[in-house]
Amino acid sequence: MAETLTTLKTRRSCRAYKPELIEEEKLNAILEAGTYAATGMGKQSPVIIAVTDREVRDQLSKINAAVMGVDFDPFYGAPEVLVVLADKSIPTYVFDGSLVMGNMMNAAADLGVASCWVHRAKEEFESETGKEILKKLGIEGDYEGIGNLILGYAADPAAAPAPRKENYIYRI
C-alpha cells in the first residue's frame, strides 16, 4: 500500500518530452491498468486507442490545437497518445472513461513513464479525421472522446508537488 500512496503523491503532469517511444512492455502494462478501472455496474463503457504512429499522433495534435485556437503542439512533443473514448449509451460513461485515464496515469508514473491528460478528445473524434480513425479501427457506436493521455519520457525533472489547499477535506 505504501508504494501506491507514494506513486499517487509523486505523479506529476509532464509538458516536455524526449522523442523516444516507451518500451512495448511498459505500454502494455499501462494499457492493461486502464482495462481494470472501475466502471459503472461493470459495463466497461470505455475503449482505448493506443496511438504510436507519428502521422496519426500529429493529426490528432493538429485537430486539438485548432480546437484550442493555438499554433503549438498541445501534446508537448510526447511521442505516444492513449485516447480514451466511452460509449454514450451508458449513463456513467464520462466517469468510466475518467477512471480509465486515472488508472493509466498512475500506472505510467509507477513505471517511470511521464504523462499528462490533454482535453479536447471529444472534439477530435467529432471531426471527420477522428471519425475516419474510428471507422478504420472498426469502432462502431456512439462514442465520445474523454481524454488524451500523452506518454513518454520526461525531458526535465518533475516539479515538487504544490501544497494541498486548506479545507480540502471535511469530516462529519
Image (spheres, rainbow, N blue to C red):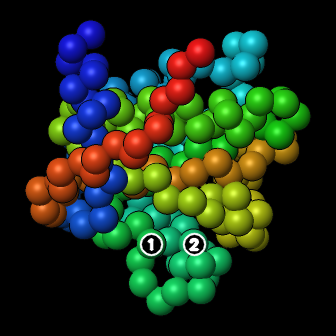
Q: Is residue 114 above or below residue 1?
A: below
Residue 8 percent across, percent down from the top left: 31, 31
Amino acid at the residue labelled 1? Pro
Task: Give the secondary structure at mark 2.
Answer: helix
User: Residue visible at 31% across and 69% down?
Assistant: 77
From the viewer's perspective, tell me whether residue 30 is left or right of residue 58: left
Viewer can see residue 130:
no
Identify the residue under disc 1. 74
Camera-nearest residue between 166 and 66: 166
User: Residue visible at 21% across and 32% down?
Assistant: 111
Can you tell which mark lies on residue 116? none
Viewer can see residue 73:
yes
Amino acid at the residue labelled 2? Asn
Camera-nearest residue between 146 and 50: 146
Residue 68 percent across, percent down from the top left: 59, 78
From the viewer's perspective, tell me whether residue 25 is left or right of residue 118: left
Q: Is residue 86 above or below residue 36?
A: below
Identify the residue under disc 2. 64
Mark 2 or mark 1, which is nearer the start of the sequence? Answer: 2
Q: Is residue 123 above or below residue 43?
A: below
Q: Quadrant of residue 126?
A: bottom right
Q: Are marks 1 and 2 in contact (CB under 8 Å)?
A: yes
User: Residue visible at 30% across and 64% down?
Assistant: 15
Which quarter shows the C terminus?
top right
Report, in whole angstroms, how far the alpha carbon at label 1 lies from the one at label 2.
7 Å
The outermost residue toward the left is 157
Task: Give the secondary structure at mark 1.
Answer: loop
The outermost residue toward the bottom is 71
